[in-house]
Amino acid sequence: MTTIIQVAEVAGVSTATVSRVLSQPERVAAETRRRVLEVVQALGYSPNVAARSLRTLRAAKILLTVPDISNPFFASVIRGAEEAARDAGYAVVLGDTRHDPDVEDQYAEMLSRREVDGLIFLGHRLPASLKPLLGRLGASAPVVNGCEYSPDLGVPSVHIDNAAASGDAIEYLIALGHRRIGVITGPAISPISRDRLAGARLAAARHDLSSDLHVRVADYSAASAFDSTCELLARDVTAIFCFSDEMAMGAISAISRAGLSCPDHVSVVGFDDLPLAPFFQPALTTVAQPKGLIGRRAVELLVGILRGEPEPVEQVMLRHELIVRSSTAPVEGNDTGSRRDLLLR
């Protein structure tokens, strides 16, 4: 196997120069750099990355943990993060925590062992094993949160204004004439679920419709929303707002199973704008998050910390957008009489 000493001898330079060409090429004269790279290619030299990492204490890896890798929402966030990490010279190590605090801690310990240079977590909990690190380093700790912002975390975060986004969805349904509106939330422990519910309630209160907002707590899955929708249909709601697109698809399935039609009898709004949302039947009205950009900006914040850029804890709030498709319609178009007949069959 070719060594760096052999490369240096053939190129007529020192081993330090070869090392600089491979790690900091901008510090080497163009002609020398060209000669060294030609020799590297001719001899088939491959640097020992593991040894170099030990010397520099840099793993060139970023750990990205997700609470549920089966949730299609995270796929776009991960892709955006990987693109940004690659641009910055880092690889991404992916961890699926499955909402388990112990698993979150196990992954976070990789940072303490310097197996990774930094951590981006997309869940709502700060792993307990990181608290001493944050207490010691403060804003310079290489830890960033994405999606589930909470000021109590005390780390940089990238997110949207979930309360405002939820309020926009409810305002839209009210503008269509809906008054009895069902809301299917995520788990109450989730900050984004609490924020979205607060936004929905505030919008309903602005129109004196607080008592007409019917809330059911689910877990972001289609199955949980299916069951919740069955309960809401019994309350004679004319629209349902779900806190994820996956739940919205479960709601539409329950509406169909009840012999009703979306949006003819019940309108449905989702959240996230998953890639399948435009192709669902009916095409789903939803709140779009800039999923890829969330991942990219989270990596950019983390890389800034790793490079020692003098920035305080930063909260990056990205824009959301209500995408109107065919799963919603004015309440005047709902055939309430036939709907009651269908439910009674």
Image (spheres, rainbow, N blue to C red):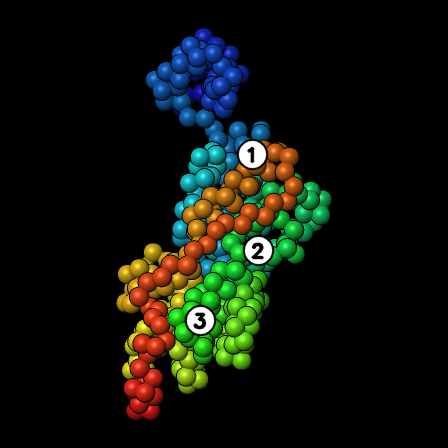
Identified by mark 1, the residue type is Arg
* Mark sitting earlier along the chain (3/1): 1
Question: Which residue is found at the position 55% from the left and 70% from the top?
Answer: 206
Residue 76 percent coordinates (x, y):
40, 51
Quadrant position of the C terminus in the picture: bottom left
Q: Is residue 276 left or right of residue 166?
A: left
Image position of 114 with respect to 334: above or below: above
Q: Which residue is mark 1?
A: 58
Question: Which residue is found at the position 53% from the left and 80% from the top?
Answer: 211
- In the rendered image, is residue 278 in sight? yes
Tell me, for residue 174, which label it has, or none: 3
Question: Which residue is found at the position 45% from the left and 46% from the top?
Answer: 293
Tell which residue pokes out farthest to the bottom in this image.
344
Q: Residues within 10 Å of mark 1 (few under 14, many from 20)?
A: some
Q: Which residue is mark 2?
A: 149
Q: Is residue 258 left or right of residue 194?
A: left
